[in-house]
Image (cartoon, helix red, strand yellow):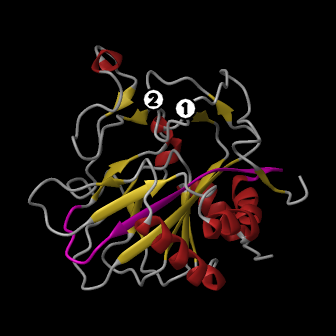
């Protein structure tokens, strides 16, 4: 088991994100194989996130662990489940989903600033995503607004490509429950950000509520990353005003229920 320090647990609780060097160093080849398989055989949710005329390629896909053995292996057998439970300060870690994100060289388009939580049908304070690059990352790194997981309101969820409201427009009419999408580059003093130079197998762990984005990839090398997402003891299903991302059609869960274990396996403790 890969041990993490109390300082790292405290940083995650304070900032909503922490870098964990070398956490997946022994799993880089497994992740590379899984990403290659995914890109050769995209799933039903695969997307290309560039407008016509934009340079490069920005591919993403999610929810493929049940058909790609590499992802099934890493989500259950890597250090991720134990470390997820420790960071969340949870007795259990339940796997939510996998997510592949690939920016080819010369892809100037950034990943927009957003929170994952409003797109999901999960509410709770015990959540964590691991963002794991398998290529060296300098200028195309994940960026997180420190402490944003403690904001009183969520950031307005929008669609990455169309840049319109994610849910039906009527849901937002006269509703001040959401914050506008922040711009840390324009207001760095208001929105202090965390960003890391990373090597293959390093990971950034961040709370589903943490506001994050990523720069474009203007390097001459690819930027391939796998995200693994987990929830803890207090996570519960919540109805959103439309299909979520991922949608998980046919899940049949009701408000306040734990996520069903046959779809979202409990992977820590590993004898659960």
Q: Can residue 176 be seen in this view?
A: yes
Residue at the (55%, 32%) spot, across then down = 249
Q: Where is residue 189 in the image (x, y as percent from the top left)?
A: 30, 56
Q: Is residue 69 rendered to the left or right of residue 187?
A: right
Q: Is residue 173 magenta?
A: no
Callout count: 2
What residue lies at 45% left-to-right and 29% top-to-bottom? 243
**Residue 97 spot, x, y in % from top left:** 59, 51
Please report the residue visible at 41 percent of the width from the left and 84 percent of the height from the top.
Answer: 136
In the rendered view of the protein, which quadrant contains the N terminus?
bottom right
Q: Where is residue 9 in the image (x, y as percent from the top left)?
A: 68, 63
Q: Give the CA separation, mark 1 to mark 2.
A: 8 Å
Q: What stretch is highlighted in magenta?
A: 89-109
**Residue 22 at least partly seen:** no
60 or 160, which lies in front? Answer: 60
Residue 63 circle label: none
Q: Nearer the viewer, residue 263 or 109?
A: 263
Question: Which label sits on residue 243?
Answer: 2
- Which element carries disc 2, helix, strand or loop? loop
Residue 249 is marked as 1
**Tag 1–tag 2 contact (CB < 8 Å):** yes
Residue 182, percent from left and from top: 29, 45
Considering the numbered disc 1 on the image, is that residue within a helix, a strand or a loop? loop
Q: Which of marks 1 and 2 is in front?
A: 1
* Of the image marks 1 and 2, the number of the one nearer the N terminus: 2
Quadrant of the image occupied by residue 123: top right
């Amino acid at each position: 088991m890969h041990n993490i320090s109390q300082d790292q647990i405290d940083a995650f609780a304070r900032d909503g994100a922490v870098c964990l060097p070398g956490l997946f160093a022994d799993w880089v080849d497994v992740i590379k194989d899984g990403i290659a398989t995914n890109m050769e055989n995209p799933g039903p949710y695969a997307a290309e996130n560039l407008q016509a005329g934009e340079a490069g390629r920005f591919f993403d896909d999610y929810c493929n662990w049940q058909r790609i053995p590499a992802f099934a292996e890493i989500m259950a057998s890597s250090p991720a489940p134990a470390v997820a439970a420790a960071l969340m300060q949870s007795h259990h870690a339940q796997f939510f989903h996998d997510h592949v994100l690939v920016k080819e060289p010369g892809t100037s388009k950034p990943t927009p600033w957003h929170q994952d939580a409003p797109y999901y049908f999960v509410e709770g304070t015990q959540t964590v995503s691991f963002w794991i690059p398998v290529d060296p990352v300098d200028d195309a790194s994940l960026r997180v607004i420190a402490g944003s997981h403690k904001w009183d309101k969520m950031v307005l969820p929008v669609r990455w490509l169309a840049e319109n409201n994610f849910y039906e427009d009527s849901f937002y009419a006269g509703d001040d429950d959401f914050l506008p999408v922040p711009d840390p580059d324009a207001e760095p003093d208001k929105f202090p950000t965390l960003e890391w130079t990373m090597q293959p197998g390093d990971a950034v762990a961040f709370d589903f509520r943490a506001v994050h984005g990523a720069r474009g990839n203007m390097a001459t090398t690819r930027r391939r990353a796998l995200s693994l997402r987990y929830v803890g003891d207090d996570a519960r299903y919540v109805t959103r005003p439309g299909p979520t991302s991922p949608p998980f059609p046919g899940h049949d869960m009701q408000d306040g229920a734990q996520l069903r274990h046959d779809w979202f396996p409990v992977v820590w403790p590993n004898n659960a």
